[in-house]
Image (cartoon, rainbow, N blue to C red):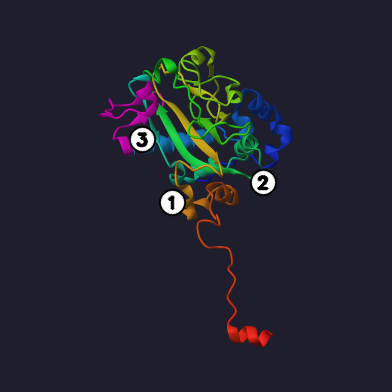
Amino acid sequence: MTPPAIASEQDAGERHLQNYRRELDEQGYTVVPPEVTGVDGSVVDALTERLLEKCEQLIGCKFTVEHGPERELDYGEFRGFLERISNATPSQFQLMQLCTYHRVFRDLAVNPVATSLIDHLFGTTGSHRAARFSSHNCFVKWAGDGYGESLGLHADQTGIPRPWGDKALNANCNWCLTDYTLRDGAFACVPGSHRKKSLPNLPDCVQDAIPIECPRGSVIVFHGALWHGAYPRTTPGLRLTLAYFYRHMAILPQDDIPGRFPRELAQDCADPALFTQLAGFGSPYRSQVYPLPRAIQEKQAAAAG
């Protein structure tokens, strides 16, 4: 498969993205349409096809966007963290380490528009970029209880000691591979809550949450301190979301990408240099890469004197 084209660096310029950056500052999130990122229908189709194949391979039954899993799924005793809090029956699962699946996922991880907005949230760019990959996941969701009445509202920076500052320490790109509507289980958030620099004040904040509705191919970029979750899906079929999670370089990643990701795959993407940087390869603290001095032998020292 020929890798689909993505937006150029020129398209990621300040002039094109200033409104989205302003929304990130004011609201804590922004929605970027596919005509801006360059992630068109053919890219979404390729991503979706690969994910559905992987679902069938791992779960053991066929999946379609229109109808969801063709068989009933058994979780056993498993309950996700947010489902345990809400006591809701699971109606989704996650696929992880997507960038090992296929180049199309790696190309998305270095989309210049998305990474430019992530850089803005961290407050650094270019050679001084602080953003690093944390994990690359997919949420496969169908009709059910979702996260219950709480909508699963949380902040991604919950594990980081407070006080938090204005700049993000975690940030997220949610790539929507299916249409997002309220009935289809849209992303939920409390606009501007990132400025509170605190955990959600549940259950009161639920009334302030709004659904983010947008067409397939859109990306929702948001600050790690934003209170967010999701509405339950009430329609047939699947909601497919790619959650590309970024972190400040000082924060421990969810997935040990610097230590375990196959480095040859980093060279097979739209921007190998950027992927290598975001993956955290080449850190001088993972091995002795800085040169060391050599002790001068006594005879050498005498001769030099």
| Residue 81 included in the magenta stretch of the image | yes
Give the residue displayed 58% in from the left and 49% down from the top. Answer: 277
Q: Residues within 10 Å of mark 3 (few under 14, many from 20)?
A: some
- Residue closer to the observer: 244 or 131: 131
Q: Residues within 10 Å of mark 2 (few under 14, many from 20)?
A: few
Q: What residue type is labelled 1?
A: Arg
- Residue closer to the observer: 234 or 34: 234
The residue under label 2 is 126
User: At which x and y percent is residue 128?
Assistant: 66, 47
Labels 2 and 3: the sequence-earlier one:
3
User: Is the C-beta separation of discs 3 and 1 under 8 Å?
Assistant: no
Give the residue displayed 58% in from the left and 82% down from the top. Answer: 297
The residue under label 1 is 260
Labels 3 and 1: the sequence-earlier one:
3
The range drawn in magenta is 58-85
The residue under label 3 is 55
The answer to whether residue 106 of the structure is visible from this angle is yes
| Residue 238 included in the magenta stretch of the image | no
Q: Which mark is residue 61?
A: none
Q: Is the magenta stretch mostly helix, strand or loop?
A: loop
- Residue closer to the observer: 70 or 26: 26
